[in-house]
Amino acid sequence: MEQLFKALRMYDNDFTDFSPFSFMEPCVGNGNIANATLRYFNFSLHRPDSVNTFVDIVDRGYPETIVQDFMTFKAERKYQLIVTNPPYSIALDFVKKCLEHLEHRGYLAMFLKIQFWDNN
């Protein structure tokens, strides 16, 4: 995860000063991506006014997980940062759904198979 965020900082000047206070992981699982993202953005995502949302279709024990199918999830807000490893079989639908929950000028990072780009 740290390499991902370092690459974004090299590619996008706006990301250099990016300090999100709203983060969503819609396939949180056991929390590997969520924990790495929270560690990387330690200052901003642990502020009292930060909003972190974790969703998964199955309760895998990650704290504060909303157990619901993300494809039917209705968030009360939009997020500055969404990072996830979606189900590959519905990756395009997942990307579209994530974009609905992303703030203008927010960042979406998806871990996808390389074949995703060939098929879409």
Image (tube, helix red, strand yellow):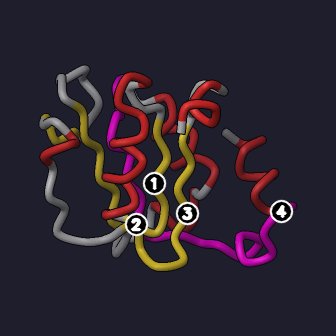
Do the numbered discs 2 and 1 sit on residues whose CB atoms are within 8 Å?
Answer: yes
In percent of the image, x 16 and y 42: which residue is there?
A: 66
Find residue 86 and report its horizontal and vertical position in percent: 41, 32
Q: CA distance from mark 3 to mark 1?
A: 6 Å
Find residue 22 and report its horizontal and vertical position in percent: 40, 66
Dot 3 or dot 4: first in sequence order is: 4
SS at badge 3: strand
Do the numbered discs 3 and 4 sit on residues whose CB atoms are within 8 Å?
Answer: no
Find residue 27 and report its horizontal and vertical position in percent: 34, 34
SS at badge 1: strand
Q: CA distance from mark 2 to mark 1?
A: 7 Å
SS at badge 2: strand
Q: Is residue 50 magenta?
A: no
Image height check: is 104 above or below 53? below
Q: Which mark is residue 69?
A: none
Dot 2 or dot 1: first in sequence order is: 1
On the image, numbered disc 1 is attached to which residue? 82
Q: CA distance from mark 2 to mark 4?
A: 20 Å
Q: CA distance from mark 1 to mark 4?
A: 18 Å
- Count of number-bearing discs: 4
Crowd tier of the residue under label 2, counting other residues whose Cα lies within 10 Å: few below 14, some 14–19, many 20 or above:
many
- Residue found at the far right of this picture: 10
Dot 2 or dot 3: first in sequence order is: 2
Do the numbered discs 3 and 1 sit on residues whose CB atoms are within 8 Å?
Answer: yes
Is residue 71 rendered to the left or right of residue 14? Answer: left
